[in-house]
Image: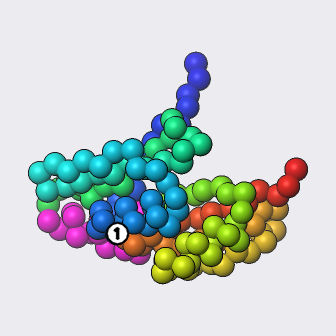
Amino acid sequence: MELTFARCFVQINDADLALAFYRDALGLEVRKDVANEGFRWITVGAASQPGVEIVLTNFVQGSPSDVDVIAALVAKGAMGGVHFHTDDLDGTFEKVRATGAEVVQEPTEQFWGTKDCAVRDPSGNLVRIDQLPAA
């Protein structure tokens, strides 16, 4: 039996801002953009990985207080996040920073052998980007 990764879900507060960040700042392609009864989900992914998707969604089930709690956790960056690889960390970082994204960490050589940076998407989710060392 072999498992492959298909998709992950990222909670967002504003679909239009998230779309601009993930499509325009990060360069991901939009695969689906679906609105249904007050919620919306947008599926994005890297062209080089057609079988892997990130679903950006503002859909939270539960009471209004549950929705408020989730929104507060997202804004704090406490709902996890996503991690990308790039072959040009400095160029990618400058492109993302130029869009006004909140910078958490500028490109930094890490002791475990990679160079990475961190930003927040418009909802507060942590987005890390790394460049693997040359082989």
Q: Is label 1 in a helix, a strand or a loop? A: helix
Question: What span is in magenta?
Answer: 64-80
Please state the horizontal and vertical placement of residue 94, each as a whole percent of the image: 62, 75
Query: Which residue is at 25% across, 47% downward?
Result: 34
For this view, does 55 lie left or right of residue 28?
Answer: left
**Towards the viewer: 125 or 14:** 14
- Which residue corresponds to the image point at 14% horizontal and 56% vertical from the top-left? 38
Residue furthest out toward the left: 37
Q: How is the image coloured?
A: rainbow
Please tell me how crowded label 1 is: few (under 14), some (14-19), or many (20+) other residues with Cα within 10 Å: some
Residue 89 in which image quadrant: bottom right
Q: Position of residue 53 (x, y in %)?
A: 46, 44
Under mark 1, the amino acid is Leu
Q: Is residue 71 magenta?
A: yes
Q: Can the viewer see residue 89?
A: yes
Q: Which residue is mark 1?
A: 17
* Residue 71, horizontal then vertical, whole percent: 29, 69
Within the magenta stretch, is there residue 67?
A: yes
Residue 62 falls in which quadrant of the image? bottom left
